[in-house]
Amino acid sequence: SARYYLGSITRAEFIAALQANSDAWDTLAAVAHRSGLAPLLLHALVTANGRTLLPGHIEDSLRTFALRTAARSMACLSALALALDLLQSEDIPVLGIKGIAFCALAPEYAALRLLSDIDLWLPTTQITTASAVLQEAGYVPDTTQRLLGPRDKHYLPLVCPATGVPIELHRRPWRPPVQVEPPEREMDVPPPPGHVSRPTPLPPLEYLVVIQALHAAICDAAPGCLRTALDIAILAGLRSIEWGCVLDIAGQVGARHGLRTVLSHAAQAGILSPPRSARLPVAREACLRAQPSDISLRLSAFGRLARRLGTYDGLLRWMRSEWHNRTWPEPDAFR
């Protein structure tokens, strides 16, 4: 469904591939739900009369998931507008990243993508002030999350009182303890017609590509996550990506290998064609073919269990060398 949505294959080829594996509908639906692509699959299979080629029970489950996704996205857009009003009224610079960036750049795709929270990137010196501004307006710390320390990438999520959507204020969009320079330029994208969101400041596309890739490579998703690969393909389709710049940004945070792994998975899935220099070496990339195409469930479960046990971050910091613990300076444009 991802390749069909991107135009890599025709509808006839897509339907033929599904009919050739018609005995695996339940597996297909499970993967779509797990990767958050159930609305995209439903969208790709809807016929002229509004029905799909899917068995009835699977179509019903996908439609239910799609309705929940749409409702959640609207709630997130409302929460974003409220947060931007509060923060920008205090002259606090803020950049939208991850799912919010897709709402601004690719609203049609965002409507088919699961959006769970609001991610905002702020200067390190403004984080405490921003958190206080939101809490004074009624935002409540999410006590279901573990208490975050000063070296974590974001503060304890704050829940919007009007929508119930959590907002994460990021010191950095990467794993700790590395702080990279925030972008010196930004995009100011107007809201699409009919949306409640106000214009959203965004970092350049190259930053957004790295953020999505590293979220899969070293956070709670897996490098083979289908949704992450599709996210990057959508970003790459907006305009020509400077892949050299993407590799430089990833190199600054010590995660170039993770970026190349994600891009190699996306290339093997047939939904993205990054240059050879942005992928793993041929011999190492061949090893990926022996792995499952979507391994997010296993790694996500392990990562979240380790985090709840309180061992993941401690082990990560112990493994990092002292030089990797330094803080990257921020440019004057983001102060």
Image (cartoon, helix red, strand yellow):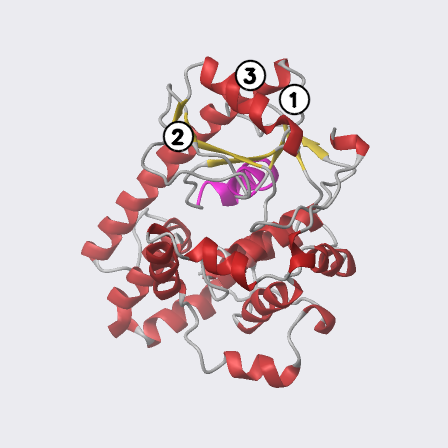
**Residue 294: x and y, percent?**
41, 67
Q: Residues in magenta?
A: 98-112
The kind of residue tagged 2 is Val
**Residue 260: x and y, percent?**
63, 68
Q: Are marks 3 and 2 in contact (CB under 8 Å)?
A: no
The kind of residue tagged 3 is Leu
**Residue at the left extreme of this rendering:** 57
**Residue 22: x and y, percent?**
28, 72
Residue position marked by numbered label 1 in the rendering: 92
Which quarter of the rendered picture does the N terminus lie within? bottom left
> From the viewer's perspective, is residue 75 above or below residue 306?
above
Residue 4 in magenta stretch: no
- Label 2, secondary structure: give it: loop
**Residue at the bottom extreme of this rendering:** 283
Q: Choose the circle earlier in sequence order: 3 or 2.
A: 3
Q: Is residue 163 left or right of residue 186?
A: left
Question: Could you say which quadrant of the image residue 14 lies in?
Answer: bottom left
- Label 3, secondary structure: give it: helix
Could you classify mark 2 by the number of other residues whose Cα lies within 10 Å: few (under 14), some (14-19), or many (20 or more)?
many
User: Is the stretch drawn in magenta largely helix, strand or loop?
Assistant: helix
Q: Choose the circle earlier in sequence order: 3 or 1.
A: 3
Q: Are marks 2 and 1 in contact (CB under 8 Å)?
A: no
Question: Could you say which quadrant of the image residue 193 lies in?
Answer: top right
Q: Are marks 3 and 1 in contact (CB under 8 Å)?
A: no
Q: Choose the circle earlier in sequence order: 2 or 1.
A: 1
Residue position marked by numbered label 2 in the rendering: 165
> From the viewer's perspective, is residue 89 above or below residue 122?
above
Residue position marked by numbered label 3 in the rendering: 86
Q: Is residue 259 left or right of residue 44?
A: right
Label 2, label 1: how far apart the Cα atoms are: 21 Å
Label 3, label 1: how far apart the Cα atoms are: 9 Å
Could you classify mark 1 by the number of other residues whose Cα lies within 10 Å: few (under 14), some (14-19), or many (20 or more)?
some
